[in-house]
Image (tube, rainbow, N blue to C red):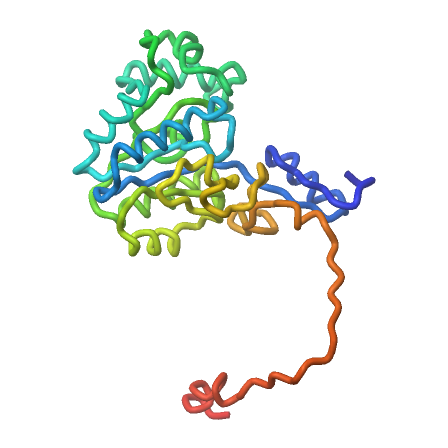
């Protein structure tokens, strides 16, 4: 890293810290843990299909793959049924325990045996009888944090499901889940209410928020959303990164600014500071 002009560190926190300590300019990113809200105004069939697409793309190796979905209580059962129709399998409590044991062999670190593997292989390792047509596995969330490892990033076709009543609870879930894992990375929402989009975007400490999209397709850039194409997603100071942007081609070039004299544009100090002067004196 010390031999180059610029370091791009996409990976674990140890590598990112090494890049930042190399003495050279560096772009580093943080782990993802994409959290997606589905409210009662969403197109449920469309939302479920897009969650399926994002969860199963490349066997969920993307840091932008949906890891948790937060469903409004009145549509909770309907969304689950639609996800089952899309190829989802919902684990019972005993199956969830088996799955956890298979996914975190030491109770802390994800097993490499399940990362980027199809649902059938993960289920077989866990001793779960998975029907042939099932493409991804769902578990019900219990607690946010180390007491429920399914609340973090899983790098596998395993999706954690949460339930909320009022929208403030959904925002709280997004905050708690991303704070535990993936702070600053991303969230999403399926809704037809513009005010909820603004409220979540304003309150969530994430660098990108996808609206009515498959999360992993949208985060990294897609032809229908204008996001810069990349696999390196900055998480801002929330995630200990230098930028919240999608690291793309323009981050790899130096720019020479050429400035010529222009007609002066002098601000009116009274407009800028007038209210302050009136209250506190000049």
Q: Is residue 66 above or below residue 273?
A: above
Give percent across and percent down for residue 49.
33, 30
Question: Which residue appears at 75% of the width and 68% of the height?
Answer: 258
The image position of residue 169, as x and y in percent, is 27, 46
Residue 241 in the image: above or below residue 153: below
Instruction: Judge by depth and name the residue closer to the eye, 50 or 33.
Output: 50
Query: Where residue 156 appears, x then y in whole percent?
Result: 45, 23
Q: Give me the residue at 59% from left, 41% from top.
A: 29
How far from the left and from the top, in percent, is residue 186? 45, 43
Task: List the single residue furthest toward the left.
Answer: 74
Q: Tell me the quarter of the image containing the N terminus.
A: top right
Count of marks, rendered view: 0
Picture quadrant of residue 54? top left
In this picture, residue 105 sits left or right of residue 88: right
Front-most of residues 61 and 109: 61
Q: Tell me if 143 is positioned left or right of 149 in this view.
A: left
Q: Which residue of the protein is positioned furthest toward the front in this rendering?
A: 223
Of residues 23 and 188, the one nearer the viewer is 188
Which residue sits at x=30%, y=52%? Answer: 196
Where is residue 45, by image quadrant?
Answer: top left
Q: Residue furthest right?
A: 3
Residue 41 vertical position relative to residue 201 in the rendered view, above or below:
above
Residue at position x 41%, y 44% in the image: 210
Vertical position of residue 110 compared to residue 45: above or below? above
Q: Is residue 13 left or right of residue 69?
A: right
């Amino acid at each position: 890293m010390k031999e180059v002009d610029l370091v791009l560190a996409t990976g674990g926190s140890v590598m990112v810290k090494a890049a930042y300590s190399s003495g050279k300019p560096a772009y580093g990113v943080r782990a993802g843990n994409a959290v997606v809200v589905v409210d009662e105004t969403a197109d449920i069939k469309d939302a479920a299909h897009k969650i399926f697409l994002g969860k199963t793309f490349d066997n969920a190796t993307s840091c932008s793959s949906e890891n948790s979905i937060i469903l409004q209580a009145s549509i909770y059962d309907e969304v689950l049924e639609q996800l089952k129709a899309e190829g989802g399998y919902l684990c019972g409590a005993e199956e969830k325990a088996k799955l956890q044991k298979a996914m975190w062999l030491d109770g802390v670190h994800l097993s490499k045996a399940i990362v980027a593997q199809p649902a059938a292989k993960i289920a077989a390792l866990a001793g779960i009888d998975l029907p042939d047509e099932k493409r991804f596995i769902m578990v019900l969330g219990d607690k946010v944090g180390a007491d429920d490892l399914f609340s973090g990033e899983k790098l596998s076709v395993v999706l954690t499901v949460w339930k909320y009543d009022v929208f403030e609870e959904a925002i709280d879930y997004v905050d708690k889940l991303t704070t535990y894992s993936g702070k600053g990375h991303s969230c999403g929402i399926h809704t037809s209410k513009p005010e909820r989009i603004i409220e979540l975007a304003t309150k969530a400490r994430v660098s990108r928020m996808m609206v009515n999209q498959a999360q992993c397709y949208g985060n990294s850039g897609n032809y229908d959303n204008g996001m810069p194409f990349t696999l390196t997603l900055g998480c801002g100071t929330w995630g200990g990164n230098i930028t919240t942007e999608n690291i793309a081609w323009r981050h790899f070039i130096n720019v020479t600014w050429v400035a010529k004299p222009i007609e002066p544009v002098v601000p009116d100090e009274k407009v800028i500071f007038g209210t302050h002067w009136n209250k506190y004196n000049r």
